[in-house]
Amino acid sequence: MITALLVIGILVFLIVVHELGHFIAAKIVRVKVEEFGIGYPPRAFTIGRLGSTEYTLNWIPFGGFVRLYGDVGEGEHGAGSLVDANRAVQAIILIAGVVMNALAAWGLFVAALHVGVPRVVDVPPEGEVVRLMIANVVPGSPADAAGVSPGDEILGLEDEDTVLTVLTPEAFSDFVRAHGGEKVSLTYVHAGKTQTTDIIPAHAVVPEAAGTPALGVGIVLVSSQPLSWSDAAVEAFTTTRGAFATVLRGLWDIVRRASTGAPALSEIVGPIGLVGVVGDAAEHGAGNVLALAAFISVNLAIINLIPIPALDGGRLVLLGVETLMRRAAPKLALQMLNALGVALIIVLMVTVTYNDIVRLIS
């Protein structure tokens, strides 16, 4: 129950932050904001009114919204009307939500790094405890055959006569290269349990280094040492950029698999699946929950840029088309496109939720 409430809290916070971006941008460019709502209608009560904007709390607690003058309805023209604003102004308002999600991701990553979360370091910082972790495993490699997985921690590597005493990526790689075709013993932590397995480094494991013996693992040094606020703020830029790259690669992989007829939505996690993900993160501390919230914020930023009608990306595409046509799109066409977009989003949500339930049952 607590985890479910935490998931709802994260989603509401990130969606409200997104809408806050639209709100701030609209205020700056002098487009009238009629209502800023937390949750979705029906309305529970009115918090208050400031200027022309009404602030409300609504009964469906899964996000928020901004209602702009001239965004919907007929006859909403004149000073402060969105529909009368030039298309550059409209684009700024639309993009502002995505920008706010990106800024929220950076801020959450700053807080996570300050609290302390695992992060990759190039050189072991003085006085910090670091771990040698497996970042990826080459399919069909000796390490893959031995059951080693990404996320495992390496505790030791040795042969019959020598024990590797300095656990760094460079020392590990040098040791492996020196034992091509020879059995080495790898000790590592997998799923919380210490295991030891014998592996023989082989050639042709890594395509770009076919002549070099390898186990088929990518290894990195990881530190969980909390950073100062200033260091965390700098490091968070790199972390946020990496999160955007990761999500974009994942989205491209979904599109690529869908184009070949392969299942594309089976691995996507929806609200129900997030309960388990957030629960796992909570077990590892507040820093991991903050980092996960930041990653979800990155997802929301990118998803909102997808050119589907009813999403910010779809509306931006429509603005571009209207700019090229030099006239507004027919109202009936807009209504049909929005209805199509909403229907598509509902189908996607139902599919993702179904997959969440199947994973939960199995």
Image (cartoon, helix red, strand yellow):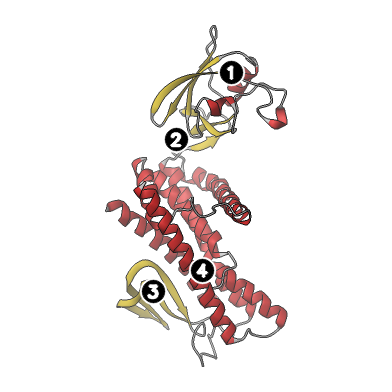
74 to 222, vertically: above or below: below
**Residue 350 in sight in this render:** yes
Q: Amino acid at mark 2?
A: Gln
Q: Nearer the viewer, mark 2 or mark 3?
A: 3
Q: Amino acid at mark 1?
A: Ile
**Residue 24 in sight in this render:** no
Question: What residue sits right under mark 4 in the picture?
Answer: 344
The 10 Å Cα crowd at callout 2, few under 14, some 14 to 19, many 20 or more, is some
Q: Gap between marks 1 and 3, in whole Å?
A: 61 Å
Determine whether the residue tagged by mark 4 lies in a helix, strand or loop: helix
Say the numbered circle drawn on residue 225: 2
Q: Position of residue 251 (x, y in %)?
A: 57, 54
Question: What residue sits right under mark 1 in the picture?
Answer: 200
Compare marks 2 and 3 and give the one earlier in the sequence.
Answer: 3
Q: Gap between marks 2 and 1, in whole Å?
A: 34 Å
Question: What residue sits right under mark 3 in the picture?
Answer: 37
Q: Residue at x 54, y 54 (%)?
A: 264
Determine whether the residue tagged by mark 2 lies in a helix, strand or loop: loop
346 to 227, vertically: above or below: below
The 10 Å Cα crowd at callout 3, few under 14, some 14 to 19, many 20 or more, is many
Q: Nearer the viewer, mark 1 or mark 3?
A: 1
The quadrant where residue 129 appears: top left
Determine whether the residue tagged by mark 3 lies in a helix, strand or loop: strand
Q: Nearer the viewer, mark 4 or mark 2?
A: 4
The quadrant where residue 79 appears: bottom right
Q: Position of residue 337 (x, y in %)?
A: 56, 77
| Count of numbered tags | 4
